[in-house]
Amino acid sequence: MDGGVIRSEREYYHRYGLDAAKLAHAKPDAIVMHPGPMNRGVEIDGTLADDINRSVIQEQVEMGVAVRMAAMDVLAQTLRHAAKPVLV
């Protein structure tokens, strides 16, 4: 944070980072989500990120990898089929 509008990571976390005080305003059954990679202590408090009762971050990251792999497979298959010559 090179002296822009937000002068430091600490200021960013204070304004925008998710912490227990901010999460207290959410519904009691609200879940914590983040697609990763995550800047602990800047975007979200590490304790909230690791809370097994509220956080689904680990599952999001795991499923995100699987989804990206599946999308790449579909793309590769499509490109492979498009490259084959058509015999008439």
Image (cartoon, helix red, strand yellow):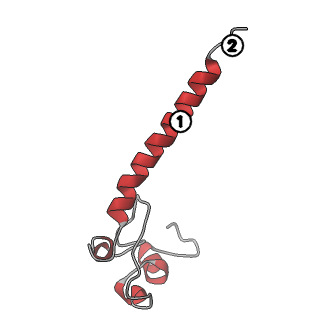
Q: Residue furthest right?
A: 88
Q: Are marks 2 and 1 in contact (CB under 8 Å)?
A: no
Residue 86: where, in percent of width, then height? Answer: 68, 13
What residue appears at the point 53 percent right and 76 percent down from the top-left corner? Answer: 6
Q: Which residue is mark 2?
A: 86
Q: Nearer the viewer, residue 27 or 24?
A: 27
What residue appears at the point 39 percent right and 60 percent down from the top-left corner? Answer: 60
Q: Nearer the viewer, residue 67 or 88?
A: 88
Q: Residue furthest top?
A: 88
Considering only vertical position in the picture, is 14 above or below 35? below
Residue 27: where, in percent of width, then height? Answer: 43, 88
How many marks do you count on the picture? 2
Quadrant of the snapshot with the C terminus: top right
Q: Nearer the viewer, residue 70 or 86?
A: 86
Quarter assignment of residue 42: bottom left
What residue appears at the point 42 percent right and 69 percent down from the top-left corner? Answer: 33
Classify mark 2: helix, strand or loop: loop
Residue 25: where, in percent of width, then height? Answer: 44, 91
The Cα atoms of the two marked residues, 2 and 1, are separated by: 20 Å
- Mark 1, other Cα within 10 Å: few <14 / some 14–19 / many ≥20: few
Looking at the image, tell me whether mark 2 or mark 1 is earlier in sequence order.
Answer: 1
Residue 67: where, in percent of width, then height? Answer: 45, 48
Quarter assignment of residue 83: top right
Q: Is residue 83 left or right of residue 44?
A: right
Q: Which residue is mark 1?
A: 74
The residue type indicated by label 2 comes to Val
Query: Which label lies toward us, 2 or 1?
Result: 2
Classify mark 1: helix, strand or loop: helix
Q: Is residue 19 left or right of residue 86?
A: left
What residue appears at the point 64 percent right and 23 percent down from the top-left corner? Answer: 82
The residue type indicated by label 1 comes to Val
